[in-house]
């Protein structure tokens, strides 16, 4: 089951990278996507990034480093970029996330 999950995570990461590159390059991406070597290289780069992230996560865990979900939530709520009139605004938070490629699902579940 873990193997399926890892494969699905990889394919999702590849799809996200393709979407990011499509947005960044527009019509030029179609030319690149037709190049088999480019796609192979992109897939390898995504795999390398996922491996690096997993290794960093494991290293942080081994060192006893971590942050709770509540600490992350508090930091997000305190970020002025996500506030309107001095209060956290989930609509603003999600709008800023969407502009950075977030899929639009609510992230914090905070008040709008």
Image (tube, rainbow, N blue to C red):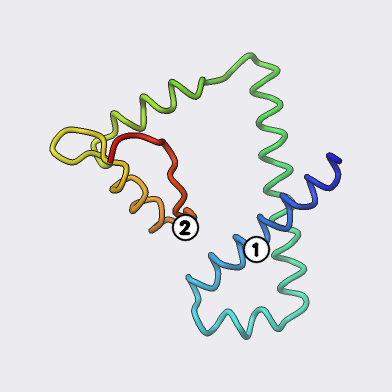
Q: Looking at the image, which residue is at 41% across and 36% down?
A: 108
Q: Residue furthest top?
A: 64
Examine the rendered structure and indicate whether residue 94 appears above or below residue 21. Answer: above
> Which numbered circle lies on residue 101?
2
Report the residue marked by disc 1.
Answer: 15
Please, what secondary structure does the residue beneath circle 2 have?
Answer: loop
Number of marks in the rendered image: 2
Question: Residue 99 is drawn in which quadrant?
Answer: bottom left
Question: Residue 78 is drawn in which quadrant?
Answer: top left
Mark 2: give few (<14), some (14-19) or many (20+) Cα within 10 Å. Answer: few
The picture places residue 107, in percent across and down from the top left corner, at: 44, 41
Q: Residue furthest left?
A: 85
Judged left or right of residue 59, residue 7 is right
The picture places residue 44, in percent across and down from the top left corner, at: 75, 59
Q: How far apart are the alpha carbons under marks 1 and 2? A: 12 Å
The picture places residue 65, in percent across and down from the top left corner, at: 59, 18
Asked whether 28 or 89 is in front, the reply is 89
Examine the rendered structure and indicate whether residue 99 appears above or below residue 66. Answer: below
Instruction: State the quadrant of the C terminus.
Output: top left
Instruction: State the quadrant of the N terminus.
Output: top right
Asked whether 6 or 26 is in front, the reply is 6
Q: Looking at the image, which residue is at 53% across and 65% down?
A: 20
Q: Looking at the image, which residue is at 83% across and 39% down?
A: 2
Judged left or right of residue 28, residue 40 is right
Work out whether mark 1 precedes mark 2 in sequence or the reverse, and give the earlier one.
Answer: 1
């Amino acid at each position: 089951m873990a193997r399926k999950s890892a494969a699905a995570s990889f394919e999702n990461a590849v799809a996200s990278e393709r979407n990011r590159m499509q947005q960044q390059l527009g019509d030029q991406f179609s030319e690149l996507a037709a190049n088999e070597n480019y796609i192979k290289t992109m897939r390898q780069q995504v795999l390398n990034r996922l491996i690096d992230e997993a290794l960093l996560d494991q290293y942080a865990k081994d060192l006893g480093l971590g942050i709770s979900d509540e600490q992350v939530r508090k930091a997000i709520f305190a970020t002025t970029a996500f506030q309107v009139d001095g209060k956290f605004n989930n609509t603003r938070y999600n709008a800023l996330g969407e502009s950075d490629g977030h899929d639009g699902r609510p992230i914090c579940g905070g008040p709008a």
